[in-house]
Image: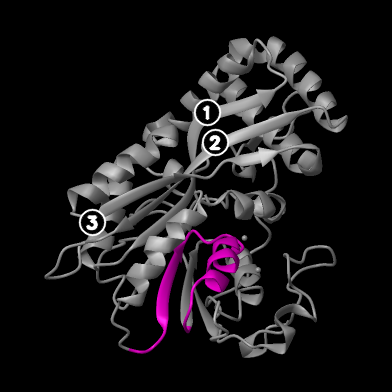
Amino acid sequence: MTDTGTAGGGLPARTGPPGDEPPGAGPDAGAGARAAVRLPGGGEQGPPAAAGPPRDDRPRVIAGAGPVAGSGARASARLRDGGEPEPPRYAPEWLRLREGADSAARARELLVPLRERIARLPRRAGALVVHDLGCGTGSMGRWLAPRLDGAQHWVLHDRDPRLLRFAAVSAARRAADGSGVTVETRHGEVGLLTPDALTGAHLVTASALLDVLTRGEVESLAAACAGATCPALLTLSVAGRVDLTPAHPLDAEITEAFNAHQRRDGLLGPDAVTVAREAFAAHGATVRVGPSPWRLGSGQSALTAQWLRGWVGAAVEQRSGLRARADRYLRDRLAACGAGALEVVVHHSDLLALPRPAGGAS
């Protein structure tokens, strides 16, 4: 899955046209605090690919990703090198729209054992080093950094330089105890994620990422974290369950088709947390899973409407025979959403993996 004052290095507060700023960007962001930011090298890329030509007047949208370049688009982070660079998948507008729901949903109970483990970690250079994989516009860092004590240095990974700029300029500046937070960015695929790549890391994080990986990629991630003796907090993986109120006879069929779409081309979709739990446990890690559901009501109608379009659109893309009934279903659901008469719970799961400390028990 995958979300961003004047920052260090002379980066201006606004990196795009008016109205393009990420949350927290602007002259007042950071209250004058400055971050150590290293921007990705090379030229600037244009904005992420917009939705393609409309099909039956509907934009291409996948729930959890917003507008996409095409039905075969993959995640913005990859665990292996090879192949041609892929078009950006995540639209910053979608990432901004979902950030509040993500923040409210994450399983805060997992922070207790994480903080306990971090407190026992050796700090060679003083700061807690956190690698954020497929960081998008940096929402994970904005959520987590202020909830951890001590100086922190975040390493933000993403293949989209525009999203990296957003993440850098709106990164959290202070930890929970007031210590400073610094940031660097790494532009490109998250390729060859090995223990060497995580040298010096104290924590790996990701948000909405596991479910768009393959089994092999998740196993590589678990092996890398275990080799580096590095905890991992991986949040907001789809669980394959959706509750809509009021219920509709087509809910279950749409859910089933959407889940099949999430599993296309070997992706894990709703199986991701089960596979990840097994992969980390196989390396001796203690694994804890907590629920992180979106709870969407009348106050989140814009997010609910966008999610509905993506959820139904992906289901129809998977099973074209649903199209006529799904069109009517979507119209009815959007009308109820607009009237404040629809409530949705989109179930996700968060996973915390605590590796066995070198020479000791976990």
Secondary element under disc 1, as helix, strand or loop, is strand
Precedes in sequence: disc 3 or disc 1: 3
Circle 3 Cα neighbour tier, 10 Å, few/some/many (<14 / 14–19 / ≥20):
some
Mark 2 — residue? 347
Left-right relation of 302 to 67 = right
Circle 2 Cα neighbour tier, 10 Å, few/some/many (<14 / 14–19 / ≥20):
many
Q: Which mark is residue 223?
A: 3
Picture layout, residue 263 above or below residue 168: above
Name the mark nearer the viewer: 3 or 1.
1
Q: Which mark is residue 241?
A: 1
Q: How is the image coloured?
A: one colour
Instruction: Tell me which corner region of the image, top left, top right, bottom left or bottom right, holds residue 138.
Output: bottom right
Picture layout, residue 196 above or below residue 338: below
Name the amino acid type tagged 3.
Ala
Please tell me which residue is depicted at 63% across the width and 30% down the height of the picture: 311
Name the amino acid type tagged 2.
His
How far separated are the C-alphas under marks 1 and 2? Answer: 6 Å
The magenta stretch spans which residues? 125-151
Residue 222 in view in this figure = yes
Name the amino acid type tagged 1.
Arg
Residue 308: percent from the left, percent from the top? 69, 31
